[in-house]
Amino acid sequence: MKMFDYVKPATLAEAVAAAAQPGAAYLAAGTNLLDLMKDGVSRPDRLIDITHLPGLDRVEHLADGSVRIGTLVSNAGLAHDTDFAKVYPAVAEALLSGASAQLRNVATVGGNLLQRTRCAYFYDKASRCNKREAGSSCDARDGENRLHAVLGWSESCIATHPSDFCVPLVALDAVVEIEGNSGRRELPLEELHRLPGDAPERDTVLEPGDLIVAVRLPPAARSFAAHARYLKVRERTSYAFAVVSAAATLHVENGKISEARLALGGVAAKPWRARAAEQVLKGTASEAANFREAAQAALADAKPSGDNAFKIELARRVIVRALSLAANGTPARMPALPASPFASNSGALHA
């Protein structure tokens, strides 16, 4: 591992100033960053430790009905927060489907949003990767690419974003609060991550020194609690990233969908909001034929980036299944296998 400076700022302002310097990176749990450093993929000159900064590890239910989640809240802490899980069940289900229990206990909300792709060519320094080294080419294009992007990819990069947590957050119009050199600002989470274009080395729109201090779910997100599910198809039931995932949340009134929110994971370099599908569903009956039409709309622009045409059809089927599960109602208890297509739901539905 490369030698680096370790900085422990006393305030947010000090942290931002230190991180704005070239070669700096923020350190929280480090569950992704430290692996990248050990492999020589990430080589920061300076780590800015934010773990001790006050006020970043709280879940706050605000007076306007929104919830504010500090960047240092652990994945497990949030998923097992009973009040939070009852109101945002798809978010809790997504969190519990990711990584292992040990990692969820330490991994943070902010780190989850900013984790790097798990593309094998990004991790392999012997391979060419534009995301790791700008302008070096992309060996994934002619390599093992069955798990790569089918939406929003470019000739420069076909990697996917690995987060489960981000998918329902994007569906529910989450906002990130960012502390930067010019002060505090807010940004829709949907706009945080970049598609690769010709600059895949930039994962997000964050500028040097920018620190995500919180994620906030708006008051309207609460209203989807009764019909909300996250579904994740992976190559093994645990400790695996999504081949395709979907977060589906609905308002169902007298058998008809008055409003729908849908987002996909595992298909692009960012969590993918399927707005065309949402429009298809609005005002329609809650039935399979309409779910299939919505799935077609969601994947209308999809195209293989390699040996992964199967992902397009798989994504359609995942959407139909996720919408069907959401329409049936949120289970009162978390499934024993969260987000798994093999999970069986038991108990009364969410009230």
Image (spheres, rainbow, N blue to C red):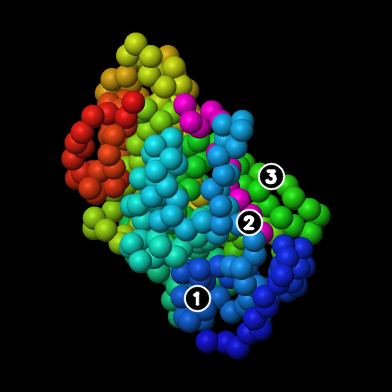
The correct choice, above or below, for 191 with respect to 87 in the image is: below
Could you give the CA–CA distance between mark 1 and mark 3, rounded to whole angstroms? 28 Å
The C terminus - image quarter: top left
Residue 105, percent across and down?
A: 40, 62
> From which residue to which does the magenta span run?
211-223
- Is residue 160 visible in this depiction of the protein? no
| Residue at left offset 66%, top offset 83% | 5
Residue 183, percent across and down?
A: 78, 53
| Residue at left offset 62%, top offset 47% | 176
Q: Secondary structure at mark 1?
A: helix
The residue tagged 3 is 186
- Is residue 17 visible in this depiction of the protein? yes
- Find out whether residue 214 is within the magenta segment: yes
Q: Quadrant of residue 16?
A: bottom right
Q: Earlier in the sequence, mark 1 or mark 2?
A: 1
> In the image, what residue type sits under mark 1?
Leu
The residue tagged 2 is 55
> In the image, what residue type sits under mark 3?
Glu
Q: Are marks 1 and 3 in contact (CB under 8 Å)?
A: no
Q: Secondary structure at mark 3?
A: strand
- Find out whether residue 230 is within the magenta segment: no
Viewer-nearest residue: 253 or 79: 79
| Residue at left offset 49%, top offset 42% | 169
| Residue at left offset 19%, top offset 45% | 342
Mark 1 Cα shell of 10 Å, populated few (<14), some (14-19), many (≥20): some
Q: Earlier in the sequence, mark 1 or mark 3?
A: 1
Left-right relation of 231 to 23: left
Which mark lies nearer to you, 1 or 2?
Answer: 2
Mark 3 Cα shell of 10 Å, populated few (<14), some (14-19), many (≥20): some
- The label shown at residue 34 is 1
- The label shown at residue 337 is none
